[in-house]
Amino acid sequence: MTGRGDDVDAAEIRSLLDACALSEAEMRLGFAGLEDPFELESTL
């Protein structure tokens, strides 16, 4: 991901991206433990 601009707060962007990362516990659950809000499982 790249970005340009004088008003970009790198620390805020890193914080937002870090908040999206799965925890170790979530990683151990695999996909079965995650919600499917877009109901993509039914399209496979």
Image (cartoon, helix red, strand yellow):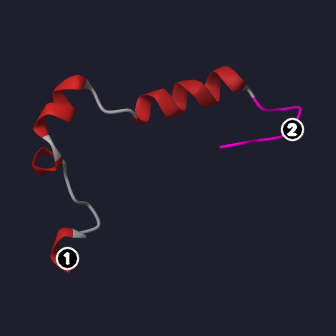
Picture quarter containing residue 11? top right
Residue tagged by mark 2? 5
Q: Is residue 32 above or below residue 17?
A: below
Q: Is residue 40 above or below residue 34?
A: below
The residue lying toward the viewer, choosing from 37 and 14, is: 14
Q: Provide the major secondary structure of the magenta segment.
A: loop
Q: Which residues are magenta?
A: 1-8
- Say which element carries label 1: loop
* Farthest-out residue, bottom: 43
Picture quarter containing residue 7? top right
* Farthest-out residue, right: 6
The residue lying toward the viewer, choosing from 2 and 36, is: 2
Mark 2 → mark 1, Cα distance in angstroms: 40 Å
Tell me which label, 2 or 1, sits earlier in the chain: 2
Q: Amino acid at mark 1?
A: Leu
Query: Residue at the spot x=27%, y=26% of the render?
Result: 23
Residue tagged by mark 1? 44
